């Protein structure tokens, strides 16, 4: 006689002479016989392994068997809480607890909505989770082939051995690139250094991914080649005088080259022009000479204008003697302001000489002649 105690979270299979003969549920059991052994199972662990002979003596309501194909996954729940994640294969789990259930997933379909607890138990290699920011676009690649462009948001994809999914993120914001100190030679054999600023952005994320391995290097090369092509066919004077023409040429040329690979040119412009020391000194002398010549022209023009004005004044005074006399009186007044007093002694003849006839009236002139001897 042998007494066996089976707890609530246990199930027991009796072996006699090594063969399973009886399955026991929780409780106290007394058995009679020789060579009796036991095989205990803990139902706290939902999954269990047992041979077909052992399963044959177990009641069917104790457990359930599930077979997952290559495109299926599953999660075991107890009391609505995820407990185990199941991959392809045959799995057996206890159903003695009414709160136990199984949820299947098809990896050929989209990933359904999952809770944080469910995501934690899913194997890291079986699920790809990607977040695309507002300033980004995502390129969905399956087995290395482009499938779609993903807008901003959160995405999840199943991963299998036959289908590997990748998401390549591309920044869609504008970027700045500076071509500093480009040493170039003009048509008239003058070597100078130019600095160009380029602002660009991604316009077609798929074409960029398919055609460019290094976006910045491609933009740099396109701007550099366009700059060399322009500078090599113009003279230094033309370059310095036509900076807007250079910017227009660079914009049209670089924009076309970048558009072919899925990029968009926002702006491009010449920032700095650095000349050699001797060339800078020579240009300074040229500018100085040009400014001096311009100043001489202006001075001569003003001198001629002043002379012409003086000639017109003299002509006017010759025609109107009274103006000359008024000018003389103004001069005497200016002198008086400086030396405080000017005395002019004249007789009647001198007064007539000083003032034109009829200026004071005929009666005044006669009175002056009468009073002069006194």
Image (spheres, rainbow, N blue to C red):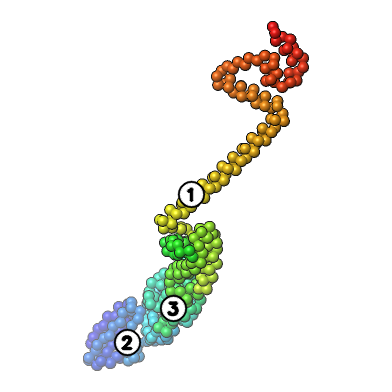
- Residue 63 in percent (x, y) is at 38, 84
- Residue 175 in percent (x, y) is at 47, 63
Mark closer to the chain start, 3 or 2: 2
Q: Is residue 215 visible?
A: no
- Residue 186 in percent (x, y) is at 47, 64
- Element under label 3? strand
For residue 50, which numbered disc appears in the image? 2
Left or right: 43 in relation to 365: left
Q: 42 or 118: nearer the eye?
A: 118
Q: How many marks?
A: 3
Mark closer to the chain start, 1 or 3: 3
Q: Is residue 243 above or below residue 112?
A: above
Q: 25 or 10: nearer the eye?
A: 10
Residue 47, by quadrant, is bottom left
Residue farthest to the top?
A: 374
- Which residue is drawn at the image coordinates 54% and 70% (left, top)? 256
Residue farthest to the right?
A: 363
Q: Is residue 244 visible?
A: yes
- Which residue is drawn at the image coordinates 72% and 30% (left, top)? 319
* Residue labelled with disc 3: 165
For residue 288, which numbered disc appears in the image? 1
Q: 86 or 231: nearer the eye?
A: 231
Q: Is residue 292 above or below residue 122?
A: above
Left or right: 362 in relation to 141: right
Mark closer to the chain start, 1 or 2: 2
- Which residue is drawn at the image coordinates 48% and 63% (left, top)? 188
Q: Is residue 106 above or below residue 203?
A: below
Does the residue at mark 3 contact the one at mark 2 (Cβ under 8 Å)? no
Residue 280, by quadrant, is bottom left
- Which residue is drawn at the image coordinates 39% and 80% (left, top)? 86
**Cα–Cα gap, marks 3 and 2:** 36 Å
- Residue 295 in percent (x, y) is at 54, 45
């Amino acid at each position: 006689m042998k007494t066996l105690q089976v707890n609530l979270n246990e199930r027991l299979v009796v072996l006699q002479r090594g063969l399973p003969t009886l399955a026991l549920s929780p409780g106290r059991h007394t058995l009679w016989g020789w060579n009796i052994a036991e095989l205990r199972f803990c139902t706290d662990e939902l999954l269990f392994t047992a041979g077909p002979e052992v399963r044959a003596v177990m009641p069917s309501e104790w457990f359930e068997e599930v077979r997952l194909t290559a495109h299926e996954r599953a999660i075991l729940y107890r009391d609505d809480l995820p407990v185990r994640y199941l991959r392809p294969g045959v799995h057996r789990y206890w159903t003695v607890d009414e709160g136990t259930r199984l949820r299947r997933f098809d990896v050929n379909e989209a990933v359904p909505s999952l809770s944080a607890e469910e995501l934690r138990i899913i194997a890291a290699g079986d699920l790809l989770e990607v977040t695309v920011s507002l300033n980004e676009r995502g390129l969905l690649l399956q087995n290395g082939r482009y499938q779609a462009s993903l807008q901003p948001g959160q995405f999840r994809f199943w991963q299998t051995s036959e289908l590997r999914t990748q998401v390549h993120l591309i920044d869609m914001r504008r970027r700045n690139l500076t071509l500093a100190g480009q040493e170039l030679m003009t048509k008239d054999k003058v070597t100078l250094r130019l600095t160009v600023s380029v602002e660009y952005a991604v316009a077609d994320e798929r074409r960029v991914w398919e055609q460019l391995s290094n976006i910045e290097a491609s933009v740099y090369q396109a701007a550099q080649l366009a700059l060399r092509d322009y500078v090599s066919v113009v003279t230094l004077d033309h370059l310095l005088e036509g900076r807007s023409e250079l910017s227009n040429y660079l914009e049209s040329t670089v924009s076309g080259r970048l558009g072919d690979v899925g990029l968009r040119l926002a702006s491009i412009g010449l920032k700095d022009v650095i000349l050699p020391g001797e060339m800078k000194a020579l240009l300074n002398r040229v500018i100085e000479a040009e400014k001096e010549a311009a100043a001489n022209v202006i001075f001569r023009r003003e001198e001629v204008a002043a002379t012409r004005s003086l000639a017109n004044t003299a002509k006017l005074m010759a025609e109107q003697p009274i103006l000359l006399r008024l000018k003389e009186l103004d001069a005497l007044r200016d002198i008086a302001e400086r030396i405080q007093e000017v005395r002019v002694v004249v007789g009647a003849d001198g007064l007539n000489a000083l003032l034109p006839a009829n200026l004071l009236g005929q009666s005044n002139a006669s009175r002056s002649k009468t009073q002069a001897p006194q």
